[in-house]
Image (cartoon, helix red, strand yellow):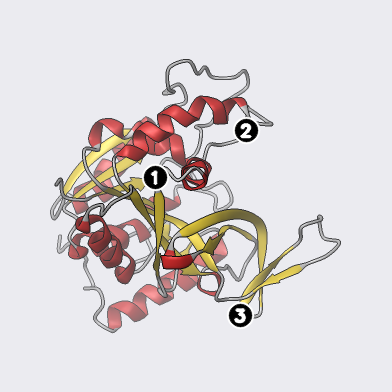
Amino acid sequence: MEKPVLLVLAAGMGSRYGGLKQIDPVGGHGQSILDYSVYDARRAGFETVIFLIKRELEADFRRTVGERTGKRMEVRYAFQQLDDLPAGCTVPEGRVKPWGTAQAVLAARDQLRGPFAVINADDYYGPGAFAAMYRFLSAGDRGPVRHGMLGYLLGNTVSEYGSVSRGVCRVGPGGLLEEIVERRKLEKDGDGARFSPDGGETWEHLPGETVVSMNFWGFRPSILEEIREQFPGLLAAMEDPARDEVCLPDVIAPLIREGKAQVEVLPCREKWYGVTYREDKPSVEAAIRVKTAMGLYPEDLWGI
């Protein structure tokens, strides 16, 4: 079996944050959140990382993250482009941005031969998450096609400075994913969060122990063909073809409903950190300082 590789989705610019947050330093030696994720992946066992980026970002990535991580891992690049679509699909009038996480994964198809993990570039997932995913992917399938997803606790993922979107999960017997419901504009509320289903008229509380997806997936290579097959129908069903996206849960949902695949939810109690808003950055920097002082990370991750 091919060894698992890591696919990092890094094509976004972070409109709410205001800048190229994927390579914005949060560590003392100019290290970004992405550096810490790749470092955690390497010590979990991953030896190859693929950065999925826009072509115009390639020079920045090679000069910063690529050069650093290339000292310890094999680094490859793939590119997300607006017109890289399955046969029969065309770019609708007015479309200027890529198509979301499902298209991003498909854009790396030429680099993917075996099992692979998928993460966002601007999320800190924690070392335990990478260790759990590497074990899962290394074990191989035992029967039906089984993908994996890290299940975080909602209370460990909300921002103090504004609303967030989270995929709220229903987990069934055997720890298998049954459903993901996207909840937008979740606001911190005690130990959990709240959302309004009716534009602010009423509010519903979600406990901090609610399992949510943070877009940390583990896939068998068959997912690439599933994305390719489903994409035309998902594109045709878009309400706003100029803006809507095709996300990984959109592809996963019918596979679960039709019994074509299973998704094992890997429990994770790690604290998630991210820079959804620029005000989040000081808390991320403080957390990294604490973890470094505790010996979880060296001062200079890559020793260069």
Q: Give how far across and how far down residue 164 sits, in percent.
A: 61, 59
Pick whichever, 240 or 78, lies toward us.
240
Pick whichever, 184 or 275, lies toward us.
184
Q: Which residue is mark 3?
A: 191
Of labels 1 and 2, earlier in sequence is 1
Image disc number at residue 10: 1
Q: Give how far across and how far down residue 218 sits, in percent.
A: 33, 52
Give the mark toward the camera: 1 or 2.
Answer: 2
Pick whichever, 300 or 266, lies toward us.
266
Q: Which residue is mark 2?
A: 243
Image position of 219 (left or right of 42) = right
Under tag 1, what secondary structure? loop
Q: Give how far across and how far down residue 172 sits, in percent.
A: 50, 64
Query: On the rendered image, what quadrant is the C terminus found in?
Result: bottom left
Under tag 3, what secondary structure? loop
| Residue type, label 1 | Ala
| Residue type, label 3 | Asp
Under tag 2, what secondary structure? loop
